[in-house]
């Protein structure tokens, strides 16, 4: 069965590297905890407000 899971992360100036590492850790933990057999796709999209990037949405398409 193919499923989709999204993860959101607000981005704070000068802490983006740390936030991306934390997001990677959350996604990896989800993959391990849910015994995902195959990752089909992993993509990022930004959210913006008044021309500034304020967040990131990571979408995981996977098969269990």
Image (cartoon, grey):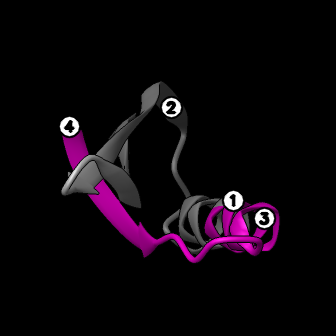
Q: Magenta stretch: give its range.
A: 1-23
Q: Which residue is mark 3?
A: 21
The answer to whether residue 56 of the structure is visible from this angle is no
Q: CA distance from mark 2 to mark 1?
A: 14 Å
* Residue beneath the point at 69% across and 59% down: 24
* Cβ atoms under marks 3 and 1 closer than 8 Å: yes
Residue at the extreme top: 40
Q: On the rendered structure, is 52 left or right of 19?
A: left
Q: Which residue is mark 4?
A: 1
Secondary structure category for the residue under label 2: strand
Q: Which residue is mark 1?
A: 24
Q: Which residue is mark 2?
A: 39
Secondary structure category for the residue under label 4: loop
User: Foreground mark, 2 or 4?
Assistant: 2
How many residues crowd mark 1 within 10 Å: few (<14), some (14–19), many (20+)?
Answer: some
**Of the image marks 3 and 2, the number of the one nearer the N terminus:** 3
Q: CA distance from mark 3 to mark 4?
A: 29 Å
How many residues crowd mark 3 within 10 Å: few (<14), some (14–19), many (20+)?
Answer: few
Above or below residue 62? Residue 18 is below
Q: Nearer the viewer, residue 7 or 40?
A: 7
**Of the image marks 4 and 1, the number of the one nearer the N terminus:** 4
**Of the image marks 3 and 4, the number of the one nearer the N terminus:** 4
Secondary structure category for the residue under label 1: helix
Q: Is residue 5 magenta?
A: yes
Q: CA distance from mark 3 to mark 1?
A: 5 Å
Above or below residue 33? Residue 62 is above
* Cβ atoms under marks 4 and 1 closer than 8 Å: no
Above or below residue 7? Residue 36 is above
User: Foreground mark, 2 or 1?
Assistant: 1
Q: Nearer the viewer, residue 27 or 21?
A: 21
* Residue beneath the point at 43% across and 75% down: 10
């Amino acid at each position: 069965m193919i499923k989709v899971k999204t993860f959101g992360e607000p981005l704070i100036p000068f802490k983006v590297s740390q936030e991306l590492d934390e997001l990677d850790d959350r996604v990896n933990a989800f993959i391990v905890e849910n015994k995902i057999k195959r990752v089909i796709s992993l993509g990022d999209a930004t959210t913006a407000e008044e021309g500034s990037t304020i967040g990131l949405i990571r979408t995981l398409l996977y098969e269990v």
